[in-house]
Image: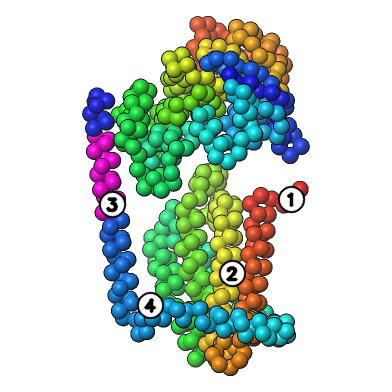
Amino acid sequence: MALADIQHDYLALTRRRRIYGGLLVVIFVAMMVSGFRVADARNAGGFWQGLHQVGDFPAALVSEAFEKSANLPGHMIRALPALVETLNIALVATLLGCIAGTALSLAATRGLARWPRLVPVARRVSDVCRAIPEIVIALVLIFILGGGPVPAVIAIAIHTAGAMGKLFSEVNENVDLKPVEGLASVGATWSQRIWLGVFPQVAPNYLSYGLLRLEVNIRASAILGFVGAGGIGYELRNAMTFGQGKFDQAAAIFLLLFATIVVVDQISGLVRNRLTHGAPA
Amino acid sequence: MLDIRDATRIFGRKAAVDHVSFRIDGPAFVGIIGRSGAGKSTLLRMMNGLTPATSGRILVEGRDVASLTGAAARQWQSQCAMIFQQFNLVPRMDVVSNVLHGILNRRGTLQTVLNLWPRADIVRALEILDRLGIAEQAPKRAEALSGGQQQRVAIARALMQDPRIILADEPIASLDPMNAQIVMDTLRRINVEDGRMVIANLHTLDTARRYCDRVIGMRDGRVVFDGLPSQLTTGVARDIYGADADFNESATSTAIPTDTSADVEYAARMLA
């Protein structure tokens, strides 16, 4: 093919791509605008009428907390036991969920699964675990088992298992199969191949997803407190109701939650660095 | 044109490049040889600015490019093309787009995101690809090409930059002998026809002898040889590579010798 033909073809290809790209942008913008208009029309209050009030609650919270800032340390200390309960719920649920998620992910990864025919089954199981909102599971379990941390742990662990089953299996799919093949060539069993050939490769990714999940679960376990699963969420619900003059308490709880997330993030960064780059010499 | 004075790069407590000084006047084809870890790659990366120099100066027509930062440093990089051992193309983009990346320094972010390139530049990219004999691959994804073709795309990206200096870091180390020859011939052609300076890290002495006007030998971050390819005797090579009398460059050479009796004899000795 002569250069002139190649140039002609490539420039035509470029034009086609630009037209398709432009059309996609137009369709995207049109859908966003029409979707927003539908949502705004169905909104009880109306987006534009309510927009100027969005800042009211944070402003009231901040100003009240500022006035009574002397009370904040005391509120924080009083809320600590509840925070510990919330953290414990999140930790146990993350641990159980990650263990179950690892098993699910191994069963759901093509090329690694022990029983390849059950791959779709494992995937659907983790889909179901993710599909049911944890607050629904928690409410059902609170109804059966009574209020307290155990229903919250089970509800969060089920959701975590589903989420980790999916994330971990994506990590597993990107694994380098050469070590696994090397181990298979010496006659290693399936579990030996996974333990020695796969886990060392995926461990840093598993850990960082697990730690991110811990942060998500701290928030989830705080929310479950709203429906009677104990922990700091219960305190927060009582404090943040309008017109009770307890916004200083609410602010103290928000600050505690924020500090907790920061601490978890810092610790997880340290742990991850240590795992991927080795201990400092 | 290029004047390197006491260029030094320290990693931790070890000097990867240790007070290297040399001058290159005019568009020469210079080969840098030395064993792994001798500092060859670091030296090239310092010239381009990928690795900042710890101390020393790299003067190009009187301007110290090692001290540039920010936009000025990127401007310099656009004039000093780099070719890598592993090609370093964007694998999922087509060949022409990869070549067009050579002019990114004068394109805005939005234009890049929308993948809008001037027609004149697209035409020029295709002409460069045609010159290197791979115009037919233009609409394919870079990852679909063979190693030798990918390296020629990388050279096309370098030419798109219209650079004064082309730095090639082990350009043929991952290629088979035939593709290696095509790539080296291409680099030499660019050097002679366009008058662009080429500095290449090489790991085979016969390549250095065949293509270079001048050879610089490095060992432990220092320049230990600087001369003509014809001065590159076995004794000098032993010095550069820090090898003892066992060293025999033809042992792993890919050149086809007329006399293979030495190989046969070596094989017989190993099998005895």
Look at mark 3 in the image and give the residue it sits on. A22
Label 2 with label 1: CB-CB less than 8 Å: no
Q: In this view, does A208 lie to the left or right of B37?
A: left
Percent from the top left, x then y, of residue B192?
46, 14
Percent from the top left, x then y, of residue B48?
57, 31
Q: Is residue A144 above or below residue B145?
A: below
Give the label, 1 or 3, closer to the camera: 3
- Residue name at image x 31 percent, y 56 percent: A25
- Highlighted magenta segment, given as a residue range: A9-24
User: Can residue B80 be seen from the camera position used here?
Assistant: yes
Judged by its main secondary structure, the magenta piece is: helix
Mark 4 and mark 2: Cα distance apart in space: 37 Å
- Residue name at image x 48 percent, y 67 percent: A163
Near-viewer residue (B227 or A34): A34
The amino acid beneath tag 4 is Trp
**Residue A199 picture quarter:** bottom right
